[in-house]
């Protein structure tokens, strides 16, 4: 079984929006997922948020096409009443971050990749940037 890696919304946006200087490291992670060396997981919230930004800057059809292609590489976590309940009762300052975290836990992820590690200071899962993750697996 390959490593299960949860992508926060900002990482998904870095990839699909080709945002520099972050794009290179997330493309390396996406390539590893394409090679079945790891499994990417993202939430429906991330899909909705990324669609909003990509549609605004690149147009609706391009946004949907990019999301369709990304969906092939990625498993989508579920958000249900239990996850919302956990998020509402957690000690996360930001509700959306709590939902992301509990989606990652519920999906059996081993790590969360984000550029906002401070948002996950209460996480029991390891938190890394895409660059840190690439460095960590290269050193193994």
Image (cartoon, grey):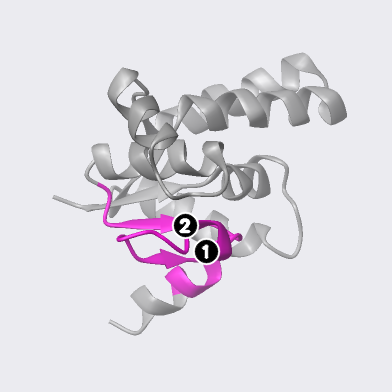
| Callout 1: SS | helix
Judging depth in this view, the residue of 38 and 34 nearest the camera is: 38
- Is 60 left, or right, of 32 in this rendering? right
**The residue stretch that appears in magenta:** 109-134
Q: Residue at x 47, y 47 (%)?
A: 7
Labelled disc at residue 130: 1
Q: CA distance from mark 2 to mark 1?
A: 6 Å
Q: Position of residue 127 (x, y in %)?
A: 42, 64
Residue 9 sits in which quadrant?
top right
Q: Nearer the viewer, residue 48 or 38?
A: 48
Above or below residue 73? Residue 10 is below
Q: Which mark is residue 113?
A: 2
Residue 127 placement, left or right of 114 = left
Q: Image height check: is 107 above or below 122?
A: above
CB atoms of marks 2 and 1 within 8 Å: yes
Looking at the picture, how far across and down is residue 119, in whole percent? 55, 57
Between disc 2 and disc 1, whose residue precedes? 2
Q: Is residue 13 left or right of residue 123?
A: right
Q: Position of residue 43 (x, y in %)?
A: 45, 31
Q: Is residue 131 magenta?
A: yes
Which residue is farthest top? 61
């Amino acid at each position: 079984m390959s490593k299960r890696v949860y992508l926060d919304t900002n990482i998904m946006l870095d990839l699909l929006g080709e945002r520099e200087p972050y794009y290179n490291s997330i493309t390396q992670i996406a390539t590893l997922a394409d090679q079945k060396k790891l499994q990417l997981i993202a939430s429906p919230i991330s899909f909705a948020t990324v669609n909003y930004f990509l549609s605004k800057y690149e147009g609706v059809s391009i946004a949907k096409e990019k999301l369709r292609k990304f969906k092939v590489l990625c498993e989508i976590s579920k958000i249900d009443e239990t996850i919302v309940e956990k998020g509402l009762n957690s000690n996360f300052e930001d509700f959306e971050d709590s939902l992301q975290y509990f989606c990652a836990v519920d999906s059996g992820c081993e790590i969360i990749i984000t550029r906002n590690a401070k948002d996950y200071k209460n996480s029991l899962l390891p938190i890394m940037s895409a660059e840190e993750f690439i460095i960590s697996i290269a050193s193994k």
